[in-house]
Image: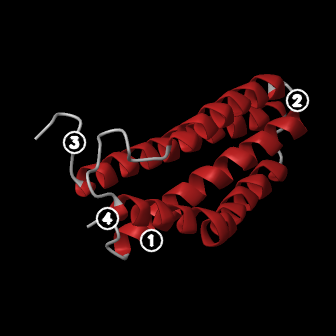
Amino acid sequence: MNIINTSQRTLKILAMIIWLMGVAILIRKSGALFSEAYALNPSFWVWIAILLGVLLGAIKTKYIFHKSCKKNIARINALETPKLWQFYRPQFFLFLAIVISLGATLSWMAHGNFPFLLIVAILDLSIGTALLLSSLICWRNKEFA
């Protein structure tokens, strides 16, 4: 077996690792943004924003992220000779680089601005929540087996 060849199961594990790294990073990042917003203005709006982030994440799970997760698993299952780098499509890596850069820029721009901090934190929390919930659905349905 060539070192670049791998199994579909390995690709699914790599895909899930990246997916869950996104969860950890976004939950941590949104927590820091919410903390900064609370330090600026310790009001109930921060708690409302957290609830809104989780709610939006659940909606994104249903309409975007779970479908995306299932689609990627189906794509991996269809690979005849999987290669180590094929756990996501090349376009996904480009998209991920753009989204990470945009998220970092928005977070940097939001410092010290209460409403902007809440908006960016809601966005990050909603994506982190959607990633987490969609991964749990995929695990529960044994789509990574």
Circles 1, 3 touching at the beta carbon (< 8 Å):
no
Residue drawn at x 65%, y 41% as measured from the top left: 30
Between the C-alphas of marks 2 and 1, the distance is 36 Å
Q: Which residue is disc 2 drawn over?
A: 113
Answer above or below: position of 132 versus 23.
below
Q: Residues within 10 Å of mark 2 (few under 14, many from 20)?
A: few
Identified by mark 2, the residue type is Asn
Identified by mark 4, the residue type is Phe
Q: Foreground mark, 2 or 4?
A: 4
Q: Which residue appears farthest toward the bottom when viewing the image? A: 141
Q: Residues within 10 Å of mark 3 (few under 14, many from 20)?
A: few
Which of disc 1 and disc 2 is earlier in sequence?
2
Q: Foreground mark, 4 or 3?
A: 3
Identified by mark 1, the residue type is Ile
Q: Which residue is disc 4 drawn over?
A: 144
| Quadrant position of the C terminus in the picture | bottom left
**Number of on-image labels:** 4
x, y percent for residue 4: 23, 35
Between the C-alphas of marks 3 and 2, the distance is 49 Å
Between the C-alphas of marks 4 and 3, the distance is 19 Å
Secondary structure beneath disc 2? loop
Q: Which residue is disc 1 drawn over?
A: 137
Secondary structure beneath disc 3? loop
Residue drawn at x 68%, y 69% as measured from the top left: 59
Residue drawn at x 84%, y 51% as measured from the top left: 45
Which of disc 2 and disc 3 is earlier in sequence?
3
